[in-house]
Image (spheres, coloured by chain):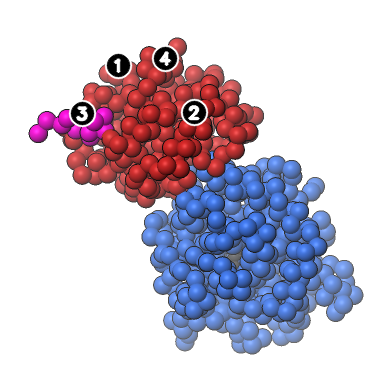
Chain colours: A blue, B red
Amino acid sequence: MTYSINEEGFYGAFGGAFIPEMLYPNVETLRRNYLDIIQSDSFQEEYQYLLKQYVGRPTPLYFAKRLSSEFDAKIYLKREDLCHTGAHKVNNTIGQILIAQKLGKKRIIAETGAGQHGVATATVCALMGLECIVYMGAVDIERQAPNVARMKMLGAEVRPATSGSQTLKDATNEAIRDWIANPANTHYIIGSVVGPHPYPDMVARLQAIISEEIRWQLKEQTGKETPDMVVACVGGGSNAAGAFYHFLEEESTRLIAVEAAGLGVDTNESAATSVLGSKGIIHGSRTLLMQDEDGQIIEPYSISAGLDYPGIGPLHAHLIESKRAEAISITDKEALDAAFHLSRVEGIIPALETAHAFAALHKMKFNSGDSIVINLSGRGDKDLGTYQKFMK
Amino acid sequence: MSRLKELFARKPKDILNIYFTAGFPELADTSRIILALDHAGADLLEIGMPYSDPMADGETIQRSGTRALQNGMKLKVLFEQLENIRERSNIPIVLMGYFNQVIQYGEEAFFAACKRVGVDGLILPDLPLEVYAREYQHLYEKYNVESTFLLSPHSDEERIRRVDELSTGFVYMVADASITGGANNISEEQIQYFQRIEKMNLNTPRLIGFGISDHAAFSSACNNAHGAIIGSAFIRQLEKDASDQGIQDFVMAIRGEKVES
Ligand SMILES: Cc1ncc(COP(=O)(O)O)c(C=O)c1O
């Protein structure tokens, strides 16, 4: 079994580029060039330099002692929360801004849910002196206010998406529209492993640094080549793709994809795509998505803006369908509890998205002493407003 | 000969294709609007299958689609509404929507329904040419549904030839590299694009759409192609006045005929 993308941009049955002709020239240019650019020496030199000196990589792989004894396992936290801007999202935006520059693009657009991708995009645009417009659902603008302020301070324009559920899906629609209207000068930095080919593969490659580091760090700290499990939350799936990437072919490493159940998978207020979804097309990709019998996309719900998305990337659809990855869904309440717990036992306040991955510890089966890597995708500063509401 | 082919054979110029969303403004309006447009002198109708996430459409069309979905429009309902339309009108009809709708309805069932009710063509902007050629062309052929693909000002020559080769109904030339309902006037640059395509001598008739909203834009599109498609402007008309008279006046105004007051 192979888990890499094929010539036509598919992972098994999932992927492809289902886009209108107006997007085709741009997406095609990207498809023709992304691998050559990413593999070029000049790109690698700049990308690695910025990851090290600007983002602060490698991020630590931290052995969480108290959490480990509580769960009778060896739990390691991959500290993406320590990246500049506070989440893994910047790994991708650094890479894509360099690609956009090589393609001669002057204007950058992005969608954002939690605002982390928006902040990471605004940051690299400031760094490179490029114009930046971020589309964000009106509901998310409310619930992630600190990130909106950060984007503005970084010089980006934040445009509210007011259609549909006014969340990540709708922000993505607006960004796509912008790209259609501005095909020549604009690059669209998608923030997850979603969208038409080559985005899922390009973003996965740019996030793969996470598992590349996990491998050598684990070896250095424990002598082990591979962990028993890698756990990550999945909105679109970029932090999970990055954390899984170099373990995809290591069948002895279990891959755990944690989705947001919202109020519960049977409540109609959920974002657990692998449970509630079926095959179809969303944002130009054939994948699993939540839809009704007429193919209308169902508006998802999660307390966490970054997981509030009715689809998952095609790689994850393929991993889950082929049983290479296991999906677990976590409710708002379970995620909140896990966030408070992690804060108290390890002194780390996680993002609400990330908290879902920690809550999964209660739901996964593992053996005593197993080594488990949890991707700590982001920090919780942006969620303090929400956390305060639930503080007792 | 299909209704669509027959139309282009009979009338190679000034084709007026009007787009509207099924089930808008009211659920039961679909067939009434078809008949009113036919009566008013439209040549061809493009009926939008409302979609939750219409990525190639602008705000106006999305708004009409949202309303239609709230009204209860579904593909099953649309095919029921079209069931006897051929007893009352012979105007060519193409459906426009998104590939996911067809997949979920069931591809074969969808094409069979098109044939049964007398739909002549299909526009799925997010169905890739390659996927069409490999997996769907035989269904279009089996059920006599004509295909239409889009061209944008940024499509290169090879792509234009491929779109021409695979489109059997007409080629949909996107006037502006923008979403529907965008710009108002036809620019010099757009005219150059229309003429560039005109000189390529495509085999398939060409209709120009996106942003065509009045008589002036319609005429300049018609000077450079077989006709034009009007969508957002007509939706705005329906929002203002969806009566048969309102529809009649709209079509006359686009044609540049005097509206009696
Ligand atoms: C901290 C954090 N983790 C996870 C996600 C979810 O995105 P993805 O599944 O692409 O990693 C987000 C998205 O905003 C995020 O901010």
Task: Name the mark on residue B198.
Answer: 2
Which element carries disc 4, helix, strand or loop?
helix
Identify which amino acid the numbered label 4 is placed on.
Ala
Tell which tag, 2 or 4, sits nearer the viewer: 2
Q: Earlier in the sequence, mark 3 or mark 1?
A: 1
Q: Earlier in the sequence, mark 4 or mark 3?
A: 4
Which element carries disc 3, helix, strand or loop?
loop
Q: Is residue B115 above or below residue A88?
A: above
Tell me where residue A44 sits by quadrant.
bottom right
Percent position of residue B99, x then y: 51, 38
Task: Name the mark on residue B87.
Answer: 1
- The reply to whether the C-beta atoms of the residues labelled 2 and 3 are less than 8 Å apart is no
Tell me where residue A10 sits by quadrant.
top right
| Crowd around label 3: few <14 · some 14–19 · many ≥20 (10 Å) | few
Quadrant (top left, top right, bottom left, bottom right) of the N terminus of chain B: top left
Looking at the image, which is closer to me, A361 or B238? B238
Q: Which residues are magenta?
A: B248-261
Tell which tag, 3 or 1, sits nearer the viewer: 3
Tell which tag, 2 or 3, sits nearer the viewer: 2
Q: Residue at x 40, y 19 (%)?
A: B12
Quadrant (top left, top right, bottom left, bottom right) of the C terminus of chain B: top left
Q: Is residue B195 above or below residue A148?
A: above
